[in-house]
Amino acid sequence: MLNIIKFLVAGTLFGLILTKSEVISWYRIQEMFRFQSFHMYGIIGSAVILGAIVVQVIKKLGMKSMDGEAISLAPKDMSITRYLVGGALFGMGWAMTGSCPGPLYAHVGYGYTVMLVAIVSAVAGTMLYGALREKLPH
């Protein structure tokens, strides 16, 4: 039960941050794809830099998960094909729905229930990837 509360609090904070930073705004996303504003690029860049710093802190301090297990990050092979194909698919999904995966839930919380179609589609796409993973270039 304690883990559920932790995830509920973390998810609520994440949703608040997405909402207050206007990341879930279709207007802001449209600005980004038209290269009309730095707003979304600044937020994405800040998230990348913060993520890199947090990963280094996790490695340096040997931090553990909430279950007490050591956190290990497996190195990934460099492959231009996987980043191009994966990035293109992610971008197309983002452009078509007006949302990346994280804000989908915030949109539903706002009452945009049509985003449930995007969530179901994202889950179906993830399951399809899992089924085809061994046959795809990595």
Image (cartoon, rainbow, N blue to C red):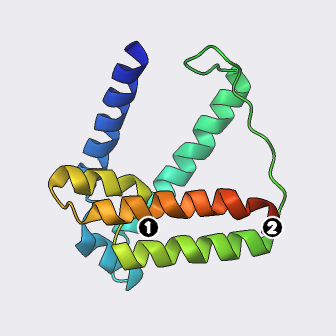
Q: Can residue 37 be seen in this view?
A: no
User: Disc number at residue 85?
Assistant: none
Q: In which quarter of the image is the C terminus?
A: bottom right
59 or 118, nearer to the observer = 118
Residue at 33% across / 57% down in the picture?
A: 104
SS class of the residue under badge 2? Answer: helix
Image quadrant where residue 62 sits = top right
Query: Would residue 85 appear left or right of 95 to someone viewing this image?
Result: right
Q: Which amino acid is tagged 2? A: Lys
In the image: residue 47, left or right of residue 17: right
* Marks 2 and 1, the one that precedes in the sequence: 1
Quadrant occupied by the N terminus: top left
Disc 2 target residue = 135
Left/right placement of residue 72 relative to residue 121 reads right
* Residue 65 visible, this angle: yes
Q: Which mark is residue 41?
A: 1
Front one among 126 and 73: 126
Residue 55 picture location, percent across and down: 64, 37
Real-space Cα separation, disc 2 to disc 1, in angstroms: 34 Å
The x and y percentages for residue 84 are 68, 76
Q: Which residue is drawn at 48% across and 57% down?
A: 123
- The quarter of the picture where residue 66 lies is top right
Residue 79, placed above or below residue 9: below
